[in-house]
Amino acid sequence: MMEVNAQKQQVGEYAASLVHADMVVGLGTGSTVKYFVEALARRVQLERLPIRGVTTSKCTAELAQRLGMTIVDIDEVDQIDLTIDGADRVNRHLEGIKGGGAALLFEKIVARNSKRNIWIVDESKVCDVLGGFPLPVEVVQYGVEHLMQLFTGAQLQPVLRRASDQQPLVTDNGNYIIDLHVAQINQPAVLADWLANQVGVVEHGLFLDICDEVIVGGETMHILTAQ
Ligand code: 5RP
């Protein structure tokens, strides 16, 4: 089996070849996207490729700007032509769990305002049923313990995400992340609706009806389209 980082590099570099001149490109977040941004920045430099990027996190914005890419605010553009992002899990219907890097809110806003969304993943991310990876939920800080109790009561096994200093992790937007531990999410749309209706929830990491195509790395890199 091809090593995971080699797969991430493979799909990241391939995705960079899908970008055309004059596009507004959504730049996701994560270790796979890092390879994409690096490859795209090389094209920008070598080919003088005129593109503008819209970023989904401070981390990606810093990387892209350091590599000489033009970054614009999402509200400066009418629409984003193509967004390339990673995912933590994706099923055969192209439904996914995202937010392992705590950037789910901006990732979803950028995705919802994109004409086309492509995810780049190594083959370990593809599954039959979503689950097996914590489902992140971004919540406001105020009243977080009450949300934790609500999620516990709903059998969602919540864990407040912490930073390396053991303090609650604070997102780019000043919120907390609660990770839900659900072994199998058999009805993602039902859970997504329920989560979206809880006061204090800003956004959840279930990305449904968003992704158009998934590029999966491996010995035979392949593309998944919705079944
Ligand atoms: C960040 C994300 C990432 O896209 C996701 O966690 C995948 O990351 P990686 O490419 O590092 O495995 O959703 O919020």
Image (cartoon, helix red, strand yellow):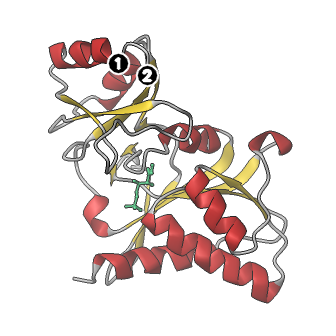
Give residue 183's position: percent from left, percent from top. Answer: 14, 39
Mark 2 element type: loop
Label at residue 181: none
Q: What x and y, as percent, mark residue 224?
A: 42, 61
Measured as percent of width and height from the top left, residue 15 is found at 57, 72
Question: Looking at the image, which is closer to me, 67 or 47?
Answer: 67
- Answer with left or right where residue 85 lies relative to residue 61: left
What amino acid type is highlighted by mark number 2? Answer: Gln
Instruction: Left or right? Give the position of 94 relative to 160.
Output: right
Q: In which quarter of the image is the N terminus?
A: bottom left
* Residue of label 2: 141
Q: How far apart are marks 1 and 2 (CA)?
A: 5 Å
How packed mark 2 is, by other alpha carbons closer than 10 Å (few <14, some 14-19, many 20 or more), is: some
Q: Name the residue under label 1.
A: 144
Q: Is residue 204 visible?
A: yes
Q: Are marks 1 and 2 in contact (CB under 8 Å)?
A: yes
The residue that appears at 58% across and 41% down in the rendered structure is 106
From what the image shows, is residue 127 above or below residue 103? below
Q: How many labels does the image show?
A: 2
Ligand 1 closer than 8 Å to label 2 CB: no
Residue appearing at x 69%, y 75% in the figure: 67
Q: What residue type is labelled 1?
A: Val
Q: Quadrant of residue 222?
A: bottom left
Question: Going by the image, does 48 lie left or right of 203?
Answer: right
Q: What element carries label 1?
A: helix
Q: Which of 64 and 128 is in front in this view?
A: 64
Q: What residue is drawn where x is 37% and y is 13%? A: 143
Q: In which quarter of the image is residue 113?
A: top right
The answer to whether any part of residue 17 appears in the image is no
Front-most of 219 and 44?
A: 44
Question: Picture quarter containing residue 62?
Answer: bottom right
Q: Against 167, is 156 above or below?
A: above
